[in-house]
Amino acid sequence: MAELTQAQKDLLETIAGLTCMPGGAFNIRANGGLAERQVTEHINITSKEDKPGIDIHIAPETKGETCYIPVVMDESGMTDIVYNDFFIGEGADVTIVAGCGIHNCGGEDSQHDGIHRFFVGKGAHVKYVENHYGSGDGLGKRILNPVTEVYQDEDSSVEMEMVQIKGVDSTIRTTKSELAKGAKLVVRERLMTHGEQHAESIYLTELNGDGSSADVVSRSVARDNSYQKYTSRIVGKAECSGHTECDAILMDNARVLAVPELDAACLDAQLVHEAAIGKIAGDQLIKLMTLGLTPEEAEEQIINGFLA
């Protein structure tokens, strides 16, 4: 076990809300190795033997427990990759808090790629929170390329909060989901880019069972010279319902590209997409400025409310 540095502790607080070791199950990874781990009666965490990463087994009917699996890095020039598999038993109802924070004060790029697979049992419910954050005044980039695969059994439900707080120079987030009969998926993505940052979000969703549904929504703010691309493809292979939406605020010289795609492979598939990209409305700024805010303060208030 490695003792955390102050920078790593600060990252943990930002991405997972942790100011001390939590109760319950957790696995904290720091600079490519295990820092701390704890298991419970219903949640077991073991290291993989063939590659870096962990297996998380959640017993059937586990209720009300939270499992933390954050990654923190403060070493410049490091490339870290992990393969984490989650096995959620039937009827369980749990929260999983993940995410990565990179503090880079050096001149070399630091990168973390997390490959997560979720096998969600019949009737189980999972809330998954993934926060990304970068800090440090070095010239080296902070790079995050997460891949998430979700396989949902009958009548299961998954809620995903995918958040990029700030400071990430480059990211490609890929999320793939396959839903069986009666399964439900809700995704809420929130991200902000600034400077020369580049962010791509790719969501690929297959609705394979009757009564399955997906609601995939992204809200983002692009500032300065940053670039964002949002791609969401929903395939309806049964009597199902799917909705995907991109809502973005464009500022300065930034660029946002939205690519929604629907593929109805069943007569009874009901699929909808929406996309809206635009600048902050002038009347919103004026209204807040009449309350005594400066233009900059009014702008920040609007952005914070939009991303809340």
Image (cartoon, rainbow, N blue to C red):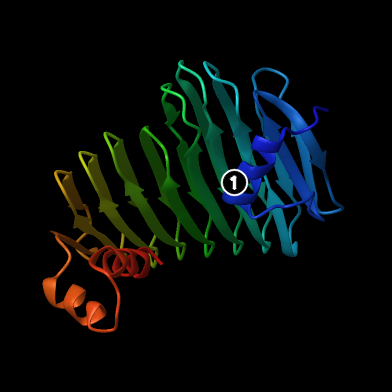
Q: Which residue is mark 1?
A: 98
Left/right of residue 91 with respect to residue 194 in the rendered view: right
Where does residue 203 sit, x and y in percent of width and height? Answer: 33, 46
Q: Is residue 170 above or below residue 182?
A: above
Helix, strand or loop under label 1: strand
Residue 251 in view (yes/no):
yes
The vertical placement of 65 against 261, above or below, is: below
**Image quarter for residue 198?**
top left
At 50% across and 37% down in the image, what residue appears? 135
On screen, 93 above or below 235? below
**Quarter residue 249 falls in:** bottom left
10 Å neighbourhood of mark 1: few (<14), some, or many (≥20)? many
User: Could you say where residue 36 lies in the image, as x and y percent from the top left?
Assistant: 79, 36
Quarter of the image that includes the C terminus: bottom left
Residue 208 can be seen in this image: no
Q: Amino acid at mark 1?
A: Ala
Classify the position of the N terminus by image quarter. Answer: top right
Q: From the viewer's perspective, is 144 left or right of 193?
A: right
Using the image as rendered, state which of residue 13 and residue 84 is in the foreground.
Answer: 13
Give left or right: position of 104 versus 289.
Answer: right
Q: Is residue 8 left or right of residue 133?
A: right
Q: Position of residue 206 (x, y in %)?
A: 34, 49
User: At x 83% / y 43%, what residue is drawn?
Assistant: 38
